[in-house]
Amino acid sequence: MYSNVYINYNAILPELIIGVTLFIAAVIDAFTNNKKWFVGLVTLIGMGTGIALSIYLWGNKFISFSQMVSLDEFSLLLFITVLIAGFITVLVSLKYVDSIESDAGHFYLLLLSSILGMMFLVSATNLIVLVLALELMSLSIYPLVGFTRDRLTSLEGSMKYLILGAFATAFMLYGIALIYSTLGTTNFYTIANVLATSQNMTANIVMMAGVAMILIGFSFKVALVPFHAWTPDAYQGAPAPITGFMAAAVKAASFAAIIKVLIVVLNTFQIPVSEAMWWLSAITMFLGNVIAVVQKNVKRMLAYSSIAHAGYIVVGLVPETPYGMSSAVFYLISYTFTIVGAFAIITYLEKNDGTGTEISDFSGLNNTHPMLSILMTIFMLSLAGIPPTAGFMAKFYVFSSAIKNGYIGLAIFGILTSVISLYYYLRIVYAMYFEEPETKTTLPVPVGISVGLLISLWGVIQLGILPADIMNLAVQSIQSLIH
Amino acid sequence: MGFREHILSIVIFLPLVGVLLGSFINKENKIAIKWFTLIVSLVEFIISLYLVTWFNTSSTSMQFTEKYTWIPAYNINYQLGIDGLSLLLIMLTTFLTPLVLLGSWTYIKNREKEYYLWFLVLETGMIGVFASLDLILFYVFWEAMLIPMYIIIGVWGGPRRIYAAVKFFIYTMFGSLLMLVAIIYLYFAYHAQTGSYTFDLLKLYNLSLPLSTQIWLFAAFALSFAIKVPIFPFHTWLPDAHVEAPTGGSVILAGVLLKMGTYGYMRLAMPLFPTAANAFLPYIAILAIIGIIYGALVAMMQPDIKKLVAYSSVSHLGFVMLGLMALNIQGVDGAVLQMINHGLSTGALFMLVGMIYERRHTRQLSEFGGIAKTMPIFATIFMIVTLSSIGLPGLNGFVGEFLILMGSFFAKPIYAVFAGTGVILGAVYMLRTYQKVFWGKITNKANEELKDLSPREIIVMIPILIMIVWIGVYPKPFLNIIHNASESYIQYVKPSTVQINSQQTSSSQVLERSK
């Protein structure tokens, strides 16, 4: 089993880059008093290098550190996704971080360490590493949510997220303990082998409970109904760039971990995961979209919308086919570009006291910033799944994989819920175009936000009009997990 | 890279290129924007004329085809091609767009740049719908076209514009999303039968699915198109959207967007699922007849001229649907011609209503009376268009309605009897309206000093009047273009044997049909 006992640093090369960047950034942060943008710049360079390296390593496969982590196309694609999300988030935050009174360089450090956690999360091949990575990610995010210390909502969101997040981790750890007690291992491949060879494992109640608890723990992280209660407060309370980052990267990494566990570990385990996910996805799509309709705050609305999107992603997992999984990965990428872009615009509108994110604050945005309102419209249409945007292609792939495998009812239900979602996405569009502005803000758009917006716009259009290449990458990445 | 090989792509994307170039014009420079967009749309029209001259009326296959791989994993292609039906609708689009743009010059007084550019975006979407032969490509254009229309209604519309815009968007979106599920299902059903994947419409025509499957798929497509047409009882979005939309929006909505529904029936819903279509056919025909009569009756009661014209659309589109359901050459030819006629005459009516609204800022019938004296040119043009709309022989409306009534009579005489009352009711409400607005004494002082049409407004109307008379007097070239498309539609839909009809129609009617 343990043929790879030697240590191959290639297997964690991208993680090393981010780790080193984190170290350098921390040192620079410690020795500079102002000029925090410099820390941001170092962060950007580190992330850019990480992206470039991940592209360069494409096609390689290493499993090392006693089968603790693997580097394959799947983890590389997710590295690129979370790094792009992080890259845009840093760009968008440059101005924001400077505008905070306190010495705010650790904003970038926390962001980097959470990304490091995500990268280990998607490359973990051992349940213990998985939990450690999940905690590294989450513990870095909690303080970011409460970053504006003088704002009560921010602290409230952070606190709720912390407590419920701790619950989720407890669930997962308990689940892992149960699995370990049954099988005597936490290694993905060993578990898979044991499951494949042993009979009647589904009758083992302890094993079943273990798997269920791990899935519940993940459901907390990706905010599936009924495990979503933390999301609205955390999303609304967090600074806008962080909300975007959470919706994009945290969700992508957590979903990637689910996908990896489903494919690598539970592939041969005949339990009705599919049926459970059918219900989770249906309830999530429905409630997320319905509750979003009545929201007045855009951040809160997009929080519920992100819950609904988690439901759509699960639709891709329900059939438990490689193609369905690939479509879920594609969905994650397209959602990342879209939501980070949308939150870049919200960041521009958000004031330091946390106001400025009501729907009424978007009124007449077209009069003052026609470009921003066009972009916001495109992002909203992408979230609603209207062609020719990334969101349409993502929904198309996900639903077609469901229909292909006979889940027509779920597809129709999902599509009906997306009609509901149209209503609230369009509300932002009509606020921008049809209503007159209350106050005219004509602050210039910071360069960082403009560049971030351009990148996300490129993603949304590229994935919407020429999705084939990215979908190919998604398919390859899923295949790299199956061997 | 020949012009001729790529003419459809050029016609589709030229307006979009215009949008990109036009976005560099300073938004304060309103004259430049107006002229620029007008010239783009005129160039577009001239290029689209090449389609007519190069179109081969004797060919039964799709013409000007283009095909490029788009998403290979799903075998989705950028596939274009047109037959007579698409050609006429594309021509209608390129014909109406410059007129609408020119007609809006004084009507639109705020945010002009956006208005004119959105219209060009809309034009790309509309032509794309008519030229796509790949279902996903079709769907992309179909949906993408909603956004410009939503913005046009919502920004430049009347007092209840936001309600109308949202209702329009959500209604149409609801239908089309169900259609998307059906499209994807169809795709996998094709694979199950033939072992290959395709969204190619022409290949999907050859699929024969069991009736139980066809019924669901047909229902999804038919519902989506029924909302668009709109067929009674799915029409409730239409009066709102029409009344609230700015004049230009109403013209395009009535002239082209509604035709996408009937186009969808003729191109997709009916030929793709012929067995189910035949099973549903009597019901759709009955709904069409209800629409004809209901639309006319409601139109008769309207105090608002624009609302009246909007409801008359429900009635006219009922005729088109009835013609399509007749499944004989007269009915289908008439239906296609009537699509064009309705686009011309209702488009013209909306423009005329817009012109009077610009002068008086009201559309209430009771506010007018006797304005034939102050606006003689306006009154004359309105008269011609009214007569065209009610189907006076010698004008376009007559040819279409006559063919449809003849076709439906051959199919089932009772249909023609009921539909015929729609013609009479149409004459009643249109002539009554005309009388109230133009004749009698001027009772309202505000009407005494109305200015007659300006040269610009006359220029907008003249091309439509020419077409109205041309189709009315010599429809042959149009029918020639339509003919093969109608034939192949009937061929796909009409059951080759009496298998289905034996259950529903008596032998005498089958005899009747075979004449």
Image: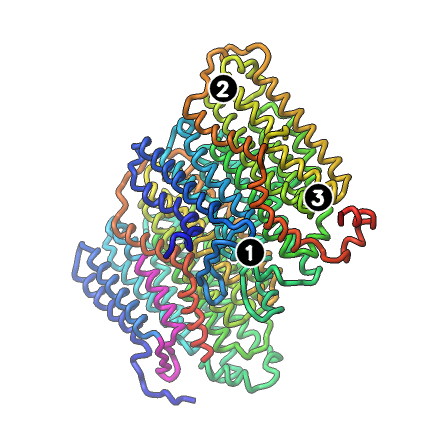
Cα gap from disc 2 to disc 3, whole angstroms: 40 Å
SS class, disc 1: loop
Q: Which residues are magenta?
A: A59-88
B44 sits left or right of B385 in the view: left
> Could you tell me if residue A146 is visible in this image?
no
Is A76 contained in the magenta span? yes
Quadrant hosting residue A169: bottom left
Location of residue A281 by image quarter: bottom right
Q: Which residue is mark 1?
A: B61
Residue situated in front as seen by the camera: A285 or B196? B196
- Observer-side mark, 1 or 3, equals 1
User: Residue B48: image x %, image y %?
Assistant: 44, 44
Query: Which circle marks residue B377 in the picture?
Result: 2
**Where is mark 3, residue-wise?**
B285
Name which of mark 1 and mark 3 comes first in the sequence. 1
**Mark 2: amino acid:** Ile
- Along the line of sight, the residue nearer the viewer: B319 or A264: B319
Q: Amino acid at mark 3?
A: Ala
